[in-house]
Amino acid sequence: MTLSLKSRIARYFCSLLPRAGLIPKPSRPQGISAIVRVLDENHWLEASILSIKDHVDEIIAVDTGSTDGSLETLERLAASVKNLKVYKFPGRLPWEFTNFAIARTSYRWIIKWDADCVAFESARGPLGGLAAFLRGLDQRTYYYVSQKLIELTGDFYHQFPGMRVRGDLDVFMYSEDARSVQVRRTLARSPGMVQLPPGYTPAPLNICLDTIRIPRYYRILSFDGVIAYHINVKPAARHLLGYFFLPWLGSENISKGQPLADYALEQVKTRWGLGDLAAAAAFYMAEYVKLLARYDESLGALPENIKALAARSPFKVVYENGKPAGRTE
């Protein structure tokens, strides 16, 4: 989150209001709640949950209508992961899910964790460091903390050159005023990393994002350590739906109850001239892999838990003449 100098100064002085008794001080028990939205993320879901269970005090996992066995995986894990609580909340928009999950948390700190994110294996690793950092802050002050993830995409050994590290997991102290809201934007081209050939990528696009709206009395800090890997390694059909996700949220049809898959099919028929999602996914993945670069070793060697996931992954980038040319599925 980037702020101007004026905004930073204003937030600093407003952050003193709880100490002055002008707004209620944080009152929840000290601890960390992770909220996890789950929708067809069964490939890496178990690894994601297990990687954070020892670093947070509770995990609020909400399945929003999975059909790939994700809910069953969560229910199985809940039998042994004692701080995992599983809920069902199907067919809702991201900001509605987030607020549903926030309302079920118990602790002072909230981490918006993604079901395709896997923390470092070591208990002394960056996520453990983040937990210690949060607990060490002045607990009379409200904070939002930005942090970073390493992006893996296509397979476990590739990245987009322009997105080796990303920072889009929200970490914030609970208050009744901190809520997820929708933000509408108009873009000149697709928000996805993959820019399809002219005629395939519509412009402009109306999109809708969900973001945590925090009051002015929150101080904004950054945590320097990279805490986890974002495992953007999924079936081609899931990558395709991800490409259309933000435009779907910004479309008028969503208010009429149109599912994402129906919106995507409508788009590929109208704009791409393809008759089904399978053909569109194959086309999209062929364009996708052309942009990939090998994993940047300067970010550090992959930890053992990530290597273990890579060893059993069915997704491998294929090369021809020294360049990415496809992917096994």
Image: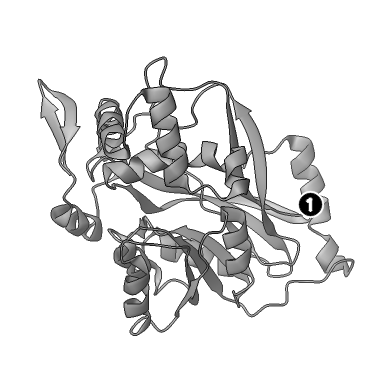
Q: Residue furthest top?
A: 198
Q: Secondary structure at mark 1?
A: loop
Position of residue 118 measured from the top left corner of the image (x, y, whole percent): 35, 58
Q: Residue 207's x, y, as percent?
A: 58, 36
Residue shown at the point (83%, 54%) measured from the top left: 14
Residue drawn at point x = 27 percent, y = 29 percent: 283
Left or right: 310 in relation to 260: left
Q: The disc labelled 1 sits on which kind of residue?
A: Arg
* Side of 45 where 219 appears, left or right: right
Rendered view: 258 above or below 204 = below
Mark 1, Cα crowd under 10 Å, few <14 / some 14-19 / many 20+, is: some
Instruction: Name the quarter where the C terminus is drawn.
Output: top left
| Residue 173 locus on image (x, y percent) | 65, 64
Compared with 73, 297 (above or below) is above
Say whether residue 136 is visible: no
What residue did someone put label 1 on? 216
Residue at position x 37%, y 70% in the image: 71
